[in-house]
Amino acid sequence: MKKNRPQTLKEKRRNLIIKWLLYLLVMAASFLFMTVTDIVVPLLHIPIAICIAIYEKNELTASFMGLLCGLLTDVACGKLFGFNGFMLTVVCMFVSLLFLYVLRHNTVNYLIVNAATAVVFGLLDYLFFYAMWGSDINGRIFVFNILIPVVLTIAISPLMWFAFRVIHHYFGIKKEHFMAEQSEDIVRE
């Protein structure tokens, strides 16, 4: 049976490297899935970026990962380069700060934030790429290019939450809690 002992510096470094390699592997696999298929696919990088923003305690790291996931989404979807990158950078920074200071790390809060982000991304995408130019006359583009990927993104997000929760549990840095005992021998005047 494994005893609870503090992690050594070598174990912390090894876990950190494995955790970030797994993050990058998940991002690469989702990028490949989004680019190879011809069917309508979910925007997989939105839940990935939000999961990383929730679990990482540094808002700069969350912003950088949001930028990377957003740029990968731009390339995979064939959109204007930097559009999703900028938006996901800002969203990840605010999500990181929100979960650091206001919200608790639970599934319901993640699902609410992820659904709101996916809906806002879909509506902004529709507004700037289709509605502004008058391309969508009968609403087919909204249903097939915007609504279905947003619904699929919301539907796949619990799986992403579970995957990143497992990665963070096994390879995250463990917090060490110490209890100080109060001595009865102290004389107070």
Image (spheres, rainbow, N blue to C red):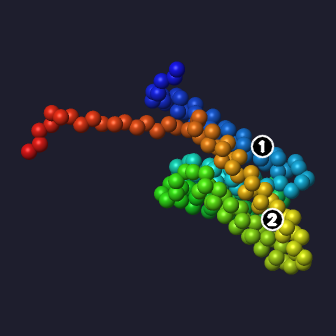
User: Residue type at mark 1?
Assistant: Ala
Above or below 134: residue 42: above
Give the residue number, with chain letter if any, for mark 2: 147
Counting from the top left corner in percent of width and height, residue 113 is at: 63, 60
Q: Is residue 9 above or below residue 106?
A: above
Picture layout, residue 187 above or below residue 132: above
Q: Amino acid at mark 2?
A: Leu
Q: Which mark is residue 104?
A: none
Q: Position of residue 178 (x, y in %)?
A: 37, 36
- The image shows residue 15 at horizontal and vertical percentages of 58, 33
* N-term-proximal mark, 1 vs 2: 1
Q: Residues within 10 Å of mark 2 (few under 14, many from 20)?
A: some
- According to the picture, the residue beneath numbered tag 1 turns out to be 29
Foreground label between 1 and 2: 2
Percent across and percent down for residue 89 are 64, 59
| CA–CA distance in space, label 1 to label 2 | 23 Å
The residue lying at 57 percent from left, 48 percent from top is 55
Of 70 and 96, the residue lying toward us: 96
Q: Is residue 149 visible?
A: yes
